Amino acid sequence: MKTGTGALKPVYILAIETSCDETSVAVVKDGCEVLSNIISSQIETHRAFGGVVPEVASRKHVEVITLVIEEAMNAAAISPQDLTAVAVTQGPGLVGALLVGVVAAKSLALAWGKPLIGTHHIAGHIYANRLVKELQYPNMTLVVSGGHTELVLMEREGEFKIIGRTRDDAVGEAYDKVARALGFPYPGGPHVDRLAREAEEAFPLPRVWLEPGSYDFSLSGLKSAVLNAVNQSKMKGLEPDVAGIARGFQESVVEVLVEKAVRAVREFSAGQLLLCGGVAANKGLREALTLRCAAEGIELIIPPPVYCTDNAAMIGAAAYVKWKHEGGIPLDMVADPGFSLEKWSVSAY
């Protein structure tokens, strides 16, 4: 279904994101202007458990969802009558957490008489880049988050093709596991990033390239190498070189990510390279990718950290693309923890 909306009529989307441990609601105008973006984080709650506990996350979403919706609407200075549609993360994510957002979005869409837009979480991360700059096609996206590590080609607006993905751990997952082995609390990624940039020397660790020409990634072997280095030091009665190991781990991860992303841009003649996902906030990765793209003459887009971690503004940006090409969806939409990015592609082509 096409929307038939005119170019002169602004599109205001209320977006809800509850896929994991952030409850976020935003109001986005025309897919690129953020009028509000409220985020309620659960990090302090889950730190005591060393990671996200799904049942606890769901309960926390229930506690704050209505308050966050109200705050987002007030911050945007907009009324329900002004909204064009209500969008929500349909998946992937923790099913209990997703359900809280889906039920809230359906309730609002029904009460306010607005169309509903089910949105893919990773599409949101990718289109967070449109909050920074207009996208050109074809482009290539390096997705790096707690649950995903992928190279995604977009030949046209809203059309996704995964050309490479992790075969085991995602980058963010590996960072948290390595951080735990080095004695850092959850979430461990920022601690590893900071220590890696402070270390004088890097502990030598392998680079995992896989088969020649492959765009896939593998982090489990590198993670095991870190654990082995830590255990060997302890067995010798020595304190592990925590800073050196952190730097060695980060350099290994970053080198492979950067090299494969740049090679993919060249092979698929992409006009831009986009970086997205929670690990896109990693300073070591941002700096390395910026330097390499400058040297290669590649246009690089990286969202500010607030749009890298889970947030509803990115869901509003992706939902706008879906709305423009297909319109809303039936209210019997269900949360899908295994939602396919490629199948979410717009059907306008």
Image (cartoon, rainbow, N blue to C red):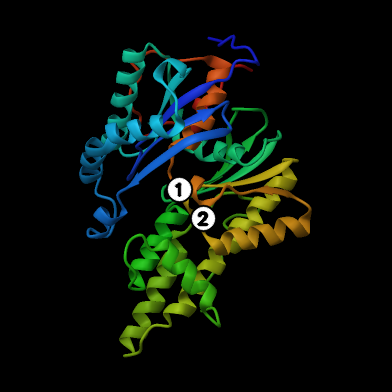
The image shows residue 259 at horizontal and vertical percentages of 65, 57
Query: Image point 47% across, 74% down: which residue?
Result: 195
Q: Three-letter amino acid code at disc 2?
A: Ala
Count the numbered circles shown. 2
On residue 281, the disc is 2
Give the spatial CA distance, label 2 vs label 1: 8 Å
| In this view, 349 is above or below 210 | above
The image shows residue 221 at horizontal and vertical percentages of 45, 63
Is disc 2 surrounded by few (<14), some (14 to 19) or many (20+) residues within 10 Å? many
Query: Image point 65% across, 58% down: which residue?
Result: 289
Q: Please identify the quadrant where the C terminus is shown.
A: top right
Query: Image point 63% across, 37% down: which residue?
Result: 153
| In this view, 34 is above or below 265 | above
Can residue 208 be seen here? Answer: no
The image shows residue 30 at horizontal and vertical percentages of 58, 25
Given residues 77 and 294, the one toward you in this image is: 77
On residue 169, the disc is none
On residue 309, the disc is 1
Residue furthest to the bottom in view is: 237
Q: Three-letter amino acid code at disc 1?
A: Thr
The answer to whether 177 appears left or right of 153 in the picture is left
Which quadrant of the figure has residue 4? top right
User: Disc 2 on helix, strand or loop?
Assistant: helix
Q: Looking at the image, do the residues carrying marks 2 and 1 touch, with CB atoms under 8 Å apart?
A: yes
The image shows residue 94 at horizontal and vertical percentages of 31, 39
User: Disc 1 on helix, strand or loop?
Assistant: loop
Given residues 132 and 238, the one toward you in this image is: 132
Is disc 1 surrounded by few (<14), some (14 to 19) or many (20+) residues within 10 Å? many
**Marked residue nearer the N-terminal end (2 or 1):** 2
Query: Image point 60% across, 54% down: which residue?
Result: 211
The answer to whether 93 appears left or right of 35 in the picture is left
| In this view, 270 is above or below 205 | above
